[in-house]
Amino acid sequence: MKLVELCVDAGADGALRAAQAGLADAYLEAGMGSEARVIAEDLLEREPGSTAHAERRRRALALLGPSLDTGDPQAPAGPPAEEIEVDLSEILAGIGAPAVEREPQDDEAYDRGREHLQAGREDEAIRDLTTATRVPRTRARAAADLGRLCIRRGELQTAVDWLELAADDPAASPEEAYNVLYDLADALERLGETARALAILVELDADAAGYRDVRRRIEQLTRAQAGSHGR
């Protein structure tokens, strides 16, 4: 995920596709069909004739269940695509190369994603919000929405990844920045990463004293850490 973000920021389109392919394969190995499907469909839009990307999409749909198998001719059944070994050094070397012409930015992707989210169409929301994270002016909000959606779905590590991306980008307002940090700390606490959660809450309390129940949660996590060290 971090490598994908780096390639997006650098405008390294070829390297980005290789990084996305590696990320999709990792999601497939982890059984995360929704995430793998979003990436595979994005890759298919860029490379419509790719049998490897079509196979990734087919495997993702299989993970999601037969009801989502649309019979799309771009997703034929067949032997598994060959494993792709992503060479990190080659990808990073390509970042300094002249940028390849990129597709126009989809400024409406965030609005579409929000509409899908409010209507309960989670897969469609993930697709459009992921697209919106590639647009600088909507990246932080889209990543925050994806993080909160992943928390609701119980996909906590993915939620942390998205919320960290949102926290790294300038927020539209201090309140939005505080909300992202609060949700990130919550996801980390649920993952059992209490030290990281506590550090974020302490930072949040320093920037916005009295924000929500931050003080109470700091006290709880401090006691929990003290207890674990005592054992």
Image (spheres, rainbow, N blue to C red):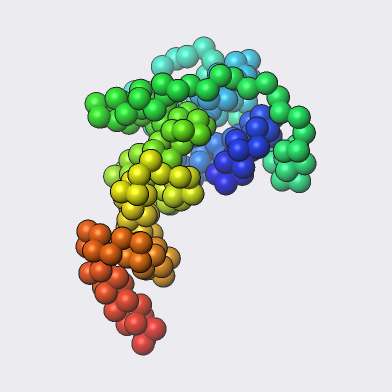
Tell me if 168 is positioned left or right of 16 in this view: left
Outermost residue toward the bottom in this view? 230
Q: Image height check: is 38 above or below 148?
A: above
> In terms of image quadrants, where is residue 7?
top right
Q: Position of residue 171 (x, y in %)?
A: 41, 44
Q: Position of residue 107 (x, y in %)?
A: 45, 23
> In terms of image quadrants, where is residue 124?
top left
Badge count = 0
Question: Which sits in the foreground, 165 or 212?
Answer: 212
Question: Which sits in the foreground, 68 or 17?
Answer: 17
Say which residue appears at 32% left-offset and 82% top-offset. 227
Q: Position of residue 17 (x, y in %)?
A: 64, 31
Say which residue appears at 44% left-offset and 15% top-offset. 71
Q: Position of residue 127 (x, y in %)?
A: 43, 28
Residue 200 in sight from this viewpoint: yes
Q: Quadrant of the C terminus?
A: bottom left
Q: Image height check: is 81 above or below 87?
A: above
